[in-house]
Image: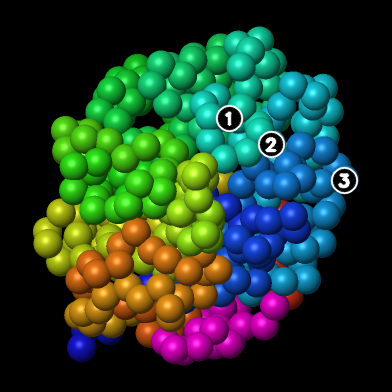
Amino acid sequence: MTRLRLPGLIDPHVHVRDLNQSHKEDWDSATAAALAGGITTILAMPNTQPPITDGAALAQYQAAAQARARCDYGLYFGAGPGNVESAARFAPQVAGMKMYLDSTFGDLKMDALSLLVEHCARWPKESPLLAHAEGHHVASAILAAHLAGRSIHICHVSRKDEIELIARARDKGYAVTCEVCPHHMFMTLDDCGLAPGYLEVRPRLATPADVAALWAHLADIDCFATDHAPHTRAEKESEKPPPGFPGLETALALWLTAAHQGRLTLEDLLARMHTNPRRIFNLPEQPDTWIEVDADCEWQPDASRMYSRAGWTPFVGWRLRGRVIAVTLRGQLAYDGERVLAQPGTGRDVMNSSYSV
């Protein structure tokens, strides 16, 4: 067994659900899944029910996280038509603000260019600004941020034209970072083998040429994020299946398998799952926190043994190499390879001023 000791990993793109969507996932189950996957900090998206677009909703989700989170966390604020003037005052409490320029799960899509421009201009420059932007909307987001004199982070890049545009923008000095998800790097529409409802995800799975382009531009990809977006089996098998894949418990193993195949190095992985996310999202260091991995362990994902309430995985039957065998969070054993030992409510908000005390 090759045993690796790695720093606690960071996932900057997680849909925790909770409150009115607790049947899909909540802070307890999502953070248990994160720890089982070697992830000790998650940043949670705002397209919730209710959406995190005002102080009341933010307070509700902060309270839910404080009561139930097992690993450390941060919340994003959601941009919308009704909070252009008020959003900025919540920046000190959140990990950043998310703008939705394309359709996905929830009701936060912004259709007006003026909203994009105003939010870019008003959101504090020291706080991260993120965009769900596909196709030509990637260009709109990058330009609007550039005109506002600030940086922007493009979420779940999935297509050849998108990563090539981002690479060109970076070469020109634009302050843009980006992330990719495992399902867009390891799966295509041609070979995913998923039933129609389970195939639904946003951005959609792309073509082999798109996947090849993402791998070719690995140097231009700053973060590996899961976009963990759980829905139940019943929902995925319904007449209108919602988009989204669970991914917290399989991501690290997928990247380690790619490392065994020579597609990336361990240093590449750590840069995109620890160093870069911590820098881009201004996250504090986690004291006395690390994970241990059996790098040679071969296994197959089994949804019945996973912590996510989704109850399924798009990677069922895949042979993976590399598995988390222990997680230590702030000096305490949080996962022993079989059980999550960290209790609900022991996770800490990375934006809290007393975080590392």
Q: To which residue does mark 3 refer? A: 56
For the residues labelled 2 and 3, the Cα–Cα distance comes to: 13 Å
Q: Tell me, for residue 250, which label it has, or none.
A: none
Indicate whether 319 appears above or below 155: below
* Label 2: element kind: strand
Question: Which residue lies at the image location 74% right of the left edge and 55% below the top edge?
Answer: 20
Q: Tell me, for residue 78, which label it has, or none.
A: 2
Crowding near the residue tagged with mark 1, few <14, some 14–19, many ≥20 C-alpha atoms within 10 Å: many
Q: To which residue does mark 1 refer? A: 100
Q: Which residues are magenta?
A: 328-344
Amino acid type, mark 2: Gly
Question: Which residue lies at the image location 50% right of the left edge and 88% below the top edge?
Answer: 339
Question: Which residue lies at the image location 51% right of the left edge and 75% below the top edge?
Answer: 307
Image quarter (top left, top right, bottom left or bottom right) of the C terminus: bottom right
For the residues labelled 1 and 2, the Cα–Cα distance comes to: 8 Å
Q: Residue 198: x and y, percent?
A: 39, 52
Amino acid type, mark 1: Tyr
Does the stretch in magenta take in 294?
no
Label 3 vs 1, first from the N-terminus: 3
Going by the image, does 278 lie left or right of 163? right
For the residues labelled 3 and 1, the Cα–Cα distance comes to: 21 Å
Label 2 vs 3, first from the N-terminus: 3
Q: Residue 74: x and y, percent?
A: 66, 55
Report the predominant secondary structure element of the magenta stretch: loop
- Which residue is the extreme one toward the right? 56
Quarter of the image for residue 156 reads: top left
**Residue closest to the eye, 297 or 109:** 109
